[in-house]
Structure formats: C-alpha cells, structure tokens
Image (cartoon, rainbow, N blue to C red):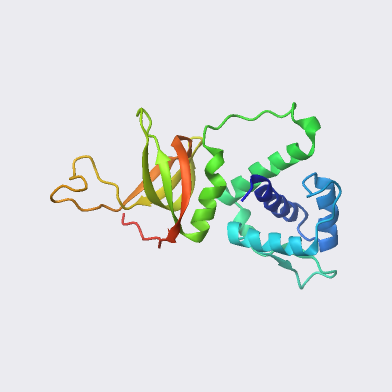
Amino acid sequence: MPANQFGRYVWLVDTFRHYKHLSYKEVSEKWQQSGLSYGEGDELPLRTFHNHRKAIMDIFNIIIELDSDVKGYKYHIVNPHELEGDGLRSRLVDSYATLNQIQADSKLQERVEFEDIPSGHTWLTIFMQAMRENKVMEITHQEFGKDYANTFEIEPYSLKVVKRRWYIIANNPYYVMLNKKHKGEDGYSPRKEIRAYGLDRINEVTILDKTFKIKKVST
C-alpha cells in the first residue's frame, strides 16, 4: 500500500475524530480543502469514501458508520475508544495527521521541526499488511555490532515502539540458541522463539505466500 494512500485513511479517521459527525457531502468538502485529494480540488467519490471506510476497519479496527440517532445521514466513529489513550492506533493517527497537514500546506514545512526517530519507517506499512493477513515474511536483518546480515522467515505478531525505535515482535520458528545444536547436527530440533527485531536493522522485507496462526506465548 502506498504511503500516501495510508495517509488518506488516517486523514479520514482524524477528521471524524475531530468533527464527530459528518455527512458524506461535508467529508467531501473537507477533502477538497485538505490538499490530499487525488486531483487538486477534486471531490471525494462516494465509492472511494466507502472503500476507505472498509480499509480503515481492516487496518485500524475503527468502524465509521451512519449514526441512526442523528438526523441528516451523518457518519461517525462507532468505537472511539480504539483511539483513546496512548496506544499504537492513537500514535499512528496523530503522527500521520500532522504529516498530512504539513504536506497539504507547504508554507509550514520550514516552520515545523521533528525529532529524528531511526526506526525504519519504510517497512511500517508492509509489516502491517502482513500482520493483517497473517502472512509469513522473509526478512534480512543485521544485528547491532555485526558486520553481516542474516535472511530468515518470521511470523509477525505485533509492532512496538521502545525508546523511540520501532520493533516487530515475531515468532521465528527456526531460531536456535547459540548453545544448542545447529541444523544438520545430531540432536537438532527447531525452537519456536518470540523475538524482537528493530526495523532500523532490517535491510529487505518480502511477504511470502503462506499464512500462520498466532500462538499464545507462555509466561
């Protein structure tokens, strides 16, 4: 999914979060003023609006539907609690909403400063896609302090920010502790391990055509 498409989804979520209730016509009018439309000043097609609502439900688990208690065919976010607190959804929407606004108004680009987060933003959307579809991924990862990278498969479970860095929490079915036997040696057996991989340490990512089921992690 292109990053600008993801940004449009976030724009729609943030717009409803701010205005609470909007008709399709009102959404389209704000869309024309946003600077994110597909063509300068273009209206938001009704079919595109509904497609965006579906994508938002799939990606963020945020439901935008008509409110039967409000006159005038107004849409609203059915489950606003998904955006409350300091969770991942809230952070993503806040971050992209700000970037969207700056993109829409070039006059602000030199007047807003951000702290650099070395977190491999390139891979965020592709990891989210794989997580949504429960698809196995092949990544090329270079551990800190190592002068070489390893390529292996993972089952992506969740994304997490720790100390300003993005990590993918994943099950690596083929991870073997250093003090265990290696593949091909007598006594070898794969160990299923939940591992955290920094996105800024990942060089290549591929979504494979096979799925997995998330397993409960024993504590």
Closest to the observer, 108 or 186: 186
**Figure check: 57 above or below 9:** below
- 181 left or right of 194 in image: left
Q: Quadrant of the C terminus?
A: bottom left
Q: Residue at coordinates 32% horizontally, 53% vertically from top-left?
A: 173
- Left or right, 50 with reference to 149: right
* Residue 81, x across and y down, in percent: 61, 58
Image point (83%, 56%), residue name: 28
Q: Residue 71's spot in the image, x, y percent?
A: 84, 70
Q: Nearer the viewer, residue 59 or 78?
A: 59
Pinpoint residue 130: horizontal percent, then vertical percent: 50, 54
Q: Residue at x 67, y 28 (%)?
A: 113
Residue at the extreme bottom of the image, as rendered: 68
Give left or right: position of 108 versus 114: right
Up-down relation of residue 134 to residue 108 (above or below): below
Front-most of 216 and 123?
Answer: 123
Furthest residue in direction left, as rendered: 186
Camera sees residue 87:
no
Mark count: 0
- Which of the 4 quarters of the picture holds residue 209? bottom left
Q: Is residue 207 visible?
A: yes
Query: In the image, is 152 to the left or to the right of 46?
Result: left
